[in-house]
């Protein structure tokens, strides 16, 4: 059962008093440098207590047990069937309970990262019913166990990073393991439950989740409503330091902003003014440290501290000892996309105490490329490899609407909610504006579009991703990321309207902003939001025209071209705050000899493989040299969003990268437990299902060749910074 907030606060206030009373006697000695972790012994002859890490806000901690029948860790009681069905019902949509919001969050986050269609593999190759060996043996796949939820913070109440540890009832304390599941994108704390959490739970491992300080915290500016750690909402003034995120805007400035720009929203990743990405590695490490504390609470014996504290304080503090010291638990840092980048950053920051190995998919990572590092494909150098997201995303946002009309992009799948005629007009107008401003050349739309695509190729986008420029922009993935990260990197306030953009509700038919929402998105934003508008009814708004603003695609004939130019200029003109933030998030690709696997699809058009995985492999081979144990598995016809594989045009053109993420996790497990060598870096030539859009045949193993020990001509050669990828 979930402990009441009062009981939790009271319990850990007494624990703090106990630590203050006993002083050095309860401070770990053998591992005094453990960053708030645990140790096997203490001073003055007393066994060490299992200390709650200093970064955990004690009053935020809650514990909930699930029976695996009515509710569970993996499916929130929905089971394999319920996850594939409609959104779970909420008794009172205006006031969901915390349990209802958790169920909704697990349902939506699970579905967001994998293909849920039966022909695509759900229930056959992956899903709660499929065991770690790929067999359909687990029924509905519900998993009993316990969850521990808390904030990590620096004492200011402004970070409030959500940490969540799941311990399955099947956890074997004699063979302990932890798998991280740092959230993908800007999702909430369950944001990698299908990407990493599911595999971990099936392996009987504890799962260390974190929303990494960017997770789905929303602030409705006109009403002052904010979200809390469990998804419930409250007035910002009432929530105080318990708010997941409250925009830091003086009352007078906020009132003036609301008058001019009504019905707008602040989101944590974009508007916290803290560049949270700089701490994603630290957040992931803290999730691991919190998991150590949790496992010691559950499985370490109690310590007799009767000589140092009163019995009342002793009982309240739990007084568990330390069974697991740093390094005692096999720990795999695993996740995808932003969570994958966070896992790599955490492994770089960890000199060898907390993380044993790394397995990540399609990592969004910004690499400091050594001068000697190079990426070549088919013998041709990729001159632009290793660009940061601030560079390639603002360029894609500028060019993609036009490049979508290029000859080689014909037949692209579309994800737009707008009529095709409107979409075509937007693309033609964007091409004309680009040509007029000198960004592309050509006297007609087709020539301009072909030039826009050629410029994306020159900037490191693979020709394999040509079909995806239309859906990446039309689905608003690229515009949303460009605006969110530009705000984050420049540490802009929500009231700055950076480059004319804001987040707000809009009229469904006209796109006009400033209209009151028929239903506030706040009660369900924790369950259905992804942290980066457009999400849950909150849209990306261009404020410049009309005066009240409008959906950015409809605000001007060329889809807010001037705003896109402004964001691009933040990078090209060297905005100092953006440059400083990008420097702060960049990594060196030194994993300190840890075994590691990266999986990425060559067709990725959101996080291009030349700027992420290939660049990381090249930099790693310089920085680690012969110590490196990193392998890259590059999947042909794989792209960034497996959830799109159920969409016509995606189903017949692309393959699930998630399948290879699971295979990579199994390869790493066998390496750690049995000493099986990891296969070397290679291109995996997966083949699409084919057929007609929306009617692709069922996925089979013939589409999904295995990662092999001897890749032959498919090997990716790596030597002293030179990465050679076969074409």
Image: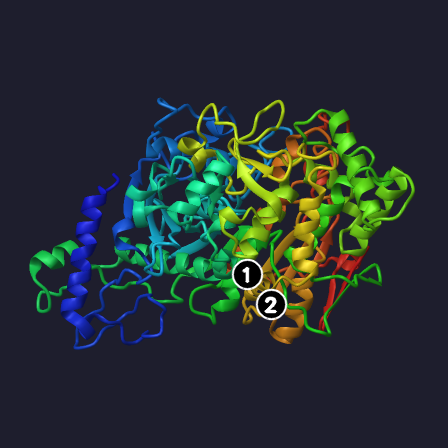
State the residue lying farthest toward the right: 443
Q: Earlier in the sequence, mark 2 or mark 1?
A: 1
184 vs 149, left or right, is right
Q: Position of residue 375 (x, y in %)?
A: 76, 64
Residue contact at pointers 2 and 1, CB within 8 angstroms: yes
How many numbered callouts?
2
Which residue shows up at 38% across the image and 57% down it? 175
676 vs 438, left or right, is left
Q: Is residue 666 visible?
A: no
Q: Secondary structure at mark 1?
A: helix
Which residue shows up at 54% across the image and 54% down it? 488
Q: Secondary structure at mark 2?
A: loop
Residue situated in front as seen by the camera: 506 or 315: 506
Q: Which residue is mark 2?
A: 589
Q: Position of residue 130 (x, y in %)?
A: 52, 37
Query: Height in image: 377 above or below 506?
Result: below
Quadrant hosting residue 140: top left
Image quadrant in which the C terminus is located? bottom right
Which residue shows up at 35% across the image and 74% down it? 33
Q: Which residue is mark 1?
A: 344
Q: Is residue 203 visible?
A: yes
């Amino acid at each position: 059962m979930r402990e009441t907030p009062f009981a939790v606060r009271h319990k850990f206030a007494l624990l703090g008093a106990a630590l203050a009373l006993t002083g050095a006697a309860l401070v770990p000695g053998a591992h005094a440098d453990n960053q708030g972790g645990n140790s096997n012994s203490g001073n003055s002859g007393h066994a060490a207590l299992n200390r709650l890490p200093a970064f955990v806000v004690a009053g935020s901690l809650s514990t909930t047990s699930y029976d695996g029948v009515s509710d569970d860790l993996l499916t929130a009681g929905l089971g394999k069937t319920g996850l594939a069905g409609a959104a779970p019902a909420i008794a009172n949509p205006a006031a969901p309970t915390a349990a209802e919001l958790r169920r909704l969050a697990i349902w939506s986050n699970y579905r967001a990262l994998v293909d849920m269609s039966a022909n695509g593999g759900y229930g056959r190759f992956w899903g709660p019913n499929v065991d770690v060996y790929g067999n359909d043996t687990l029924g509905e796949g519900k998993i009993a166990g316990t969850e521990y939820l808390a904030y990590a913070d620096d004492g200011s109440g402004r970070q409030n990073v959500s940490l969540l540890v799941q311990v399955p009832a099947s956890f074997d304390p004699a063979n302990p393991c932890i798998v991280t599941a740092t959230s993908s994108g800007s999702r909430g704390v369950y944001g990698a439950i299908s990407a990493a959490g599911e595999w971990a739970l099936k392996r009987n491992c504890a799962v260390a989740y974190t929303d990494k300080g960017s997770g789905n915290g929303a602030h409705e500016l006109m009403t002052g409503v904010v979200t809390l750690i469990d998804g419930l909402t409250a007035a910002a003034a009432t929530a105080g330091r318990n708010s997941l995120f409250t925009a830091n805007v003086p009352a007078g400035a906020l009132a003036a902003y609301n008058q001019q720009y009504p019905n707008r929203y602040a989101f944590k990743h974009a508007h916290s003014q803290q560049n949270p990405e700089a701490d994603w590695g630290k957040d992931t490490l803290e999730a691991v440290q919190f998991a150590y504390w949790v496992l010691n609470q559950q499985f370490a014996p109690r310590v007799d501290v009767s000589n140092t504290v009163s019995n009342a304080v002793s009982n309240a503090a739990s007084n568990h000892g330390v069974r697991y010291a740093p390094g005692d638990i096999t720990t795999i840092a695993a996740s995808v996309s932003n969570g994958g980048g966070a896992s790599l950053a955490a492994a770089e920051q960890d000199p060898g105490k907390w993380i044993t190995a790394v397995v990540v998919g399609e990592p969004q990572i910004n690499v400091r490329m050594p001068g000697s590092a190079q990426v070549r494909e088919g013998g041709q150098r990729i001159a632009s490899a290793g660009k940061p997201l601030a560079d390639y995303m603002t360029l894609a946002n500028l060019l993609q609407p036009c490049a979508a009309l290029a000859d080689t992009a014909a037949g692209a799948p579309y994800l737009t909610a707008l009529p095709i005629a409107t979409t075509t007009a937007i693309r033609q107008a964007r091409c004309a504006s680009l040509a007029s401003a000198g960004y592309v050349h050509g006297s007609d739309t087709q020539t301009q579009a072909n030039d826009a695509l050629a410029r994306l190729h020159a900037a490191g986008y693979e020709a394999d991703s040509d079909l995806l420029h239309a859906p990446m922009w039309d689905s608003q993935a690229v515009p949303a990321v460009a605006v969110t990260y530009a705000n984050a990197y420049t540490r802009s306030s929500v009231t700055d309207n950076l480059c004319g953009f804001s987040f707000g509700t809009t009229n469904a038919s006209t796109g006009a902003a400033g209209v009151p929402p028929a239903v506030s998105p706040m009660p369900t934003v924790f369950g259905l939001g992804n942290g980066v508008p457009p999400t849950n009814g909150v849209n990306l708004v261009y404020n410049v025209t009309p005066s009240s603003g409008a959906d950015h695609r409809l605000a001007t004939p060329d889809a807010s071209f001037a705003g896109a130019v402004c964001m691009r200029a933040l990078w090209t003109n060297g905005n100092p705050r953006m440059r400083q933030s990008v420097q702060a998030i960049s990594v060196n690709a030194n994993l300190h000899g840890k075994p590691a696997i990266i999986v990425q699809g060559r067709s990725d058009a959101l996080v291009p493989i030349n700027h992420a995985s290939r660049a990381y492999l090249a930099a790693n081979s310089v920085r680690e040299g012969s110590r490196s144990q990193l392998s890259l598995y590059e999947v042909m016809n794989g792209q960034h969003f497996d959830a799109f594989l159920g969409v016509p045009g995606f189903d017949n053109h692309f393959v699930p990268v998630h399948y290879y993420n699971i295979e990579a996790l199994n390869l790493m497990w066998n390496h750690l437990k049995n000493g099986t060598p990891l296969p070397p870096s290679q291109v995996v030539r997966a083949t699409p299902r084919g057929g007609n859009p929306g009617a692709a045949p069922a996925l089979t193993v013939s589409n999904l060749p295995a990662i092999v020990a001897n890749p032959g001509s498919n090997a990716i050669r790596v030597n002293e910074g030179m990465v050679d990828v076969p074409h």
